Amino acid sequence: LFSLMTEPLNNYWINTSHDTYLLRTKVMTLHDPKSAEKTDLQSYTLALYRGARAIELDVWDGEKGSNYPVVRYGETVFPDNTTNDSATKKAARAVSSLKFSDVLRTVSYFLQSEPNSFPIILLIENHCSLPFQEIMAKDIESVLGKQGLLYRPDPNLSPTSALPSPADLVG
């Protein structure tokens, strides 16, 4: 089926990737159940090259003393009671976290390598405190905004105006 993709964006079904940051290889999950909670930048690259145009980012404050927000799987849940101490949990969260800015760079690299791509929608599940939200905003602007990869609505349009079409947002 061929479409010129000229209707408003909300008229289309969008290939979406849920929990994009998680490793999804069946072999790894079978051999190591905890690998299902591990994060990997390659998961974003694979999702984008497989056609996902909406990707999820669960963003949290970084570890105490850090100055960057992280993408990770909520509060890590361990399947057995042998690893329930808080130091082990903290270490597991640190290992299985991605810098928010690294995920943005991954999206940027994809868009640069695929200049005729339809738009990428970032589904940001924001769990960050205000200081980390401010860092997120700066990261979005510095990684995507300065390269012209952000959609910025025309301020003269009314809030009830139709969304742009995928064709309008290519590249």
Image (cartoon, rainbow, N blue to C red):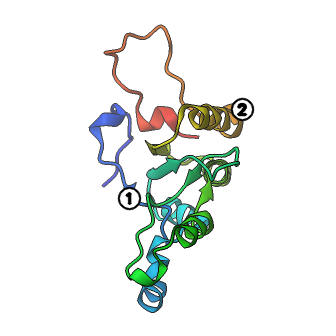
Q: Name the residue nearer the viewer: 123 or 11.
A: 123
Judged from the image, the secondary structure of the residue bearing numbered disc 1 is loop
Report x, y in % for residue 77.
40, 69
Q: Is residue 66 above or below residue 82?
A: above
Q: Name the residue nearer the viewer: 165 or 29.
A: 29
Pointers 1 and 2 in contact (CB under 8 A)? no
Report x, y in % for residue 48.
51, 59
Looking at the figure, which quarter contains the N terminus?
bottom left
Question: Which residue is painted at 52% across and 67% down in the image?
Answer: 86
| Mark 1 residue type | His
Q: Tag 2: Cα neighbours inside 10 Å, few (<14), some, or many (≥20)?
A: few
- Please tell me how many numbered marks the rendered image carries: 2
Q: Which residue is mark 2?
A: 146
Left or right, 116 with reference to 65: left
Report x, y in % for residue 124.
46, 43
Q: Is residue 111 above or below residue 141?
A: below
Asked if residue 66 can be seen in this view, the reply is: yes
Q: Is residue 95 above or below residue 120?
A: below
Q: Name the residue nearer the viewer: 88 or 171.
A: 88
Left or right, 97 with reference to 75: right
Question: Which residue is painted at 51% across and 58% down in the image?
Answer: 72
Report x, y in % for residue 38.
52, 71
Question: Which residue is painted at 38% across and 58% down in the image?
Answer: 18
